[in-house]
Image (tube, grey):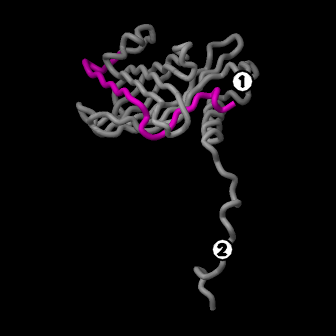
Amino acid sequence: MVGIEKLPRAPQENQHPRLTRRATLGGALAGLATAAGLGAVSSVAAADEVDGIAGGGVVTSGAGDTQFSLAVVHVPRDGQDPLLTGAFVLNDPNAPDGAVLLHSVSLVEFTAYSTERPHARQIVGWATINSAGSYPFLLRVEDTTAPGAGEDTFNLVLGQAALPFLADAGHVCDCGQYSYSLRGPLTSGDLTTIADLA
């Protein structure tokens, strides 16, 4: 009797369609919109008015590698406040004051902050660190080139240093004098704006 390991296998290469980066990010952004209930809302703006950015990767500092992931969608709605939904997660095991595991809990603002850099976005919000507290953050990211080129940029300010950007948000910072910042190019990974998915 022939063992199962000796039976010929069907070719694997065409069994499943290849999932591209654009399709993956488009699906993630569509999932965010669906989770937020946009599928049944007739007041959602035209697709060309929807803005967002998604991706993740590694930013390297002198202390080591920091990983992050991000998916944010901003949807204008007729006669209503815009819908801002998404998530930002960062893991820095080598932070100077101890490991940082950041999870966004509230997104307050999403803007394209530079007319000269059309794929640059600023996200302002609140996050927990290591599942505790309420820390303000300001994140600026830019999708600059092709995937993996190492030129997408990341600039984060968290804690006391970010508080001036959230003065009108109605939250109280219980961060004491704690501040954290990380800035640099993505050494691996990629960011993609919604405009790139069209």
53 in the magenta segment: no
Which x, y percent locates residue 178?
27, 22
| For residue 111, side relative to residue 1 (left or right) | left
Please name the residue that numbered disc 1 is placed on.
47
Badge 2 crowding class, 10 Å Cα cut-off, few under 14, some 14 to 19, many 20 or more, is few
Left or right of 56? Residue 158 is left
Q: Is 55 left or right of 67, judged from the image as shown? A: right
Could you say which quadrant of the image residue 162 lies in?
top left
Give the residue at mark 2: 9
Image quadrant in which you'd find residue 32: top right
Q: Nearer the viewer, mark 1 or mark 2?
A: 2
Q: Residue 198 at x, y = what percent?
A: 69, 30
Q: 10 Å neighbourhood of mark 1: few (<14), some, or many (≥20)?
A: few
Magenta region, residue range: 173-198
Specify whether residue 194 is painted magenta. Answer: yes
Q: Earlier in the sequence, mark 1 or mark 2?
A: 2
Check the image and report above or below for 115 versus 10.
above
Type of amino acid at the residue the image marks with label 1: Ala
> Hey, which quadrant is residue 68 in on the image?
top left
Q: Are dots 1 and 2 in contact, CB under 8 Å?
A: no
